[in-house]
Amino acid sequence: MHSPTVSTKLIILLGNPLGHSVSPPMHNRVFDCLGMDYCYMPVEVNAEDLEKVFSGLTRMNVAGFNVTIPHKIRIMEFLDELDPLAETIGAVNTICLEDGRTKGYNTDGEGFIRSLEEETGLLAPGKRFFLLGCGGAARAIAMTLAAKGAEKIFICNRTLDKAEILVAEINKKIRHCAEVVEQAPRSQAKTLQDCHVLINTTSLGMHPHEDVLPIDRSLLLPHLIVADIVYNPLHTKLLRAAKEAGCSIVPGLGMLIYQGAAAFSLWTGVEPIVSEMSDTVYSLMKKRQGK
């Protein structure tokens, strides 16, 4: 990485904790490859200091931000403008700073959809999706799928009323295409028969709970594309079980790469070298997992 100077434009990652993040090396590698005078820096900040820290950083030579857990919702209070999709989702992961004004975006859903397209060739319009979970990532993915023309989005969550709230929001804010599915295996099985893609948006399967399956193995029907947004480990128990069942699989690291690529374009107006981003994060993750 080149040495920053007073003219170097900064991209700041806000969150807590950030020790595990692969975004700084991923973005800095591409800045170097393209000869761009940018530097991506992680800044750990707690909730009570977020406003002060963010306000201070906007007065520096900062071109943009990434925002991660736990600040994706709270950060919206401090922005001048929101992209319509980010406003609908109710969370921001990318901020552009231009002429002293801040604008928030959400590239998580776009990152997932692009990863799905690149890995499988499947396009969202007219397809039926089954989502496990209804947290922040599920909101971004489901809302973006609805905006992109998915035929049906089924939401299945341990707490039924949370799923009902998300479904009602999608149907009201975007278009009537979402439906709740109860967690009972019989209900899940009936719905999955006509779906194209199963997506795990929960943290089940993530280190240190690698041995947990978010859905019964018998429901992994061979016609399904099975995607997992968990990327540590690289191949979760769900993805391994899906592959054994004859399903196509989409690992979670792709979503991280492509949401980053979309953010990179927003900050710089330049298309990043996605192959360099991918090589960097896969290499880092394999090292961390001792492979």
Image (spheres, helix red, strand yellow):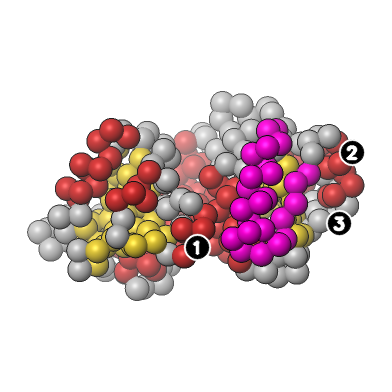
Q: Nearer the viewer, mark 1 or mark 3?
A: 1
Residue 8 lies in quadrant: bottom left
How packed mark 1 is, by other alpha carbons closer than 10 Å (few <14, some 14-19, many 20 or more), is many
For image coordinates 61% across by 63% down, the residue present is 174
Badge 1 vs badge 3, beta-carbon distance below 8 Å: no
Q: Amino acid at mark 3?
A: Asp
Q: Earlier in the sequence, mark 2 or mark 3?
A: 2
Q: For the C terminus, which image quadrant?
A: top right
Q: Residues within 10 Å of mark 2 (few under 14, many from 20)?
A: few
Residue 205 in view in this figure: no
Q: Secondary structure at mark 3?
A: loop
Write down the residue under mark 1.
Answer: 85
The amino acid beneath tag 2 is Arg
Q: Which mark is residue 194?
A: 3
- Indicate whether residue 163 is drawn in magenta: yes
Does dot 1 land on a helix, a strand or a loop? helix
Q: Earlier in the sequence, mark 1 or mark 3?
A: 1
Q: Would you say the residues marked 2 and 3 are in contact, meaning their CB atoms lie under 8 Å apart?
A: no
Is 176 covered by the magenta stretch?
Answer: yes
Amino acid at pointer 1: Leu
Residue 186 is marked as 2
Q: Residue at x 32, y 44 (%)?
A: 14
Q: Please report the bounds of the magenta region as a residue range.
A: 158-181
Name the residue rendered at 55%, 53% in the picture.
140
Question: How far across and down, in percent of the image, does residue 105 sit?
Answer: 42, 60
- Please tell me whether residue 266 is drawn above or below residue 15 in the rendered image: below
